[in-house]
Image: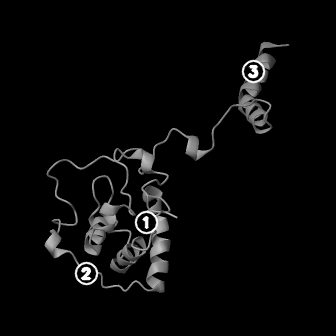
Amino acid sequence: MTPRTRRGLAIIGLVLSPFVVGLLLTYQVIRIPIDTDMARSQAVGYQDGPRILPPLGAVPLQGEAVGPDEFARNPVPADDVSLQRGKILYDIQCAVCHGERGRGDGPLAGYFTRTPENLIGSEATAEFDGSVYLTILQGFGEMPSLAENLTVRERWDIVNYIRTLPAGGK
């Protein structure tokens, strides 16, 4: 074999080697473990892990907090339509932290430094509707504001639904 022929074969081998390796990977002759399940990946999404609290003295985006003498009255009657809408919205927006039954045991509850509020406990049930509404609107502690996620009517529907959660948690 002449040096020119050897050089030509070497060039052809170098050019074809990525294709051969690709075929071997395609037909799983060479197996490389690649985790394609996003839930087990090492990436951290914006909703994962503990939430970072705002610095002390930070001004909330929604403006000043409202005092207890200024709580709004619930303008939405707790009829079947409101309760049905409230349940759907609660399941989407609130149940991930507060749990299906409102006990504060949702799937994301373990990620917070403070357990989410037990919505069927004596403290929460004693709150005014306007106070619960403001908590949904402005957030509290590690709970984010849902002002951008829910309309005014939807917030009141959730308040109406929370009031129907059974105290026994059944």
Q: CA distance from mark 2 to mark 1?
A: 23 Å
Above/below status of 111 relative to 167: above
Disc 2: which residue? 73
34 over 3 or under it: above or below: below
x and y, in percent, of residue 44 in the image: 46, 43
Q: Dot 3 surroundings within 10 Å: few (below 14), some, or many (20 or more)? A: few
Q: Name the amino acid, label 3.
A: Ala
Pointer 1 or 3: first along the chain = 3
- In this figure, which residue is indicated by the disc labeled 3? 10
In the image, is 40 to the left or to the right of 16? left
Q: Residue at 47%, 63% (x, y): give it.
A: 168
- In this view, the mark in front (2 or 3): 2
Q: Is residue 48 visible?
A: no
Q: Position of residue 55 (x, y in %)?
A: 20, 47
What amino acid type is highlighted by mark number 1? Ala
> Which residue is painted at 46% across and 79% down in the image?
83
Q: Secondary structure at mark 3?
A: helix
* Numbered label attached to residue 1: none
Residue wearing tag 1: 167
Q: Is residue 66 above or below residue 43?
A: below
Residue at 57 percent across and 41 percent down: it is 40
From the viewer's side, name the closer residue of 168 and 87.
Answer: 168
Residue situated in front as seen by the camera: 51 or 61: 51
Quarter-wise, where is residue 134 in the image? Answer: bottom left
Picture coordinates of residue 153 (x, y %)?
A: 36, 80
Dot 1 surroundings within 10 Å: few (below 14), some, or many (20 or more)? Answer: some
| Real-space Cα separation, disc 2 to disc 3, in angstroms | 83 Å
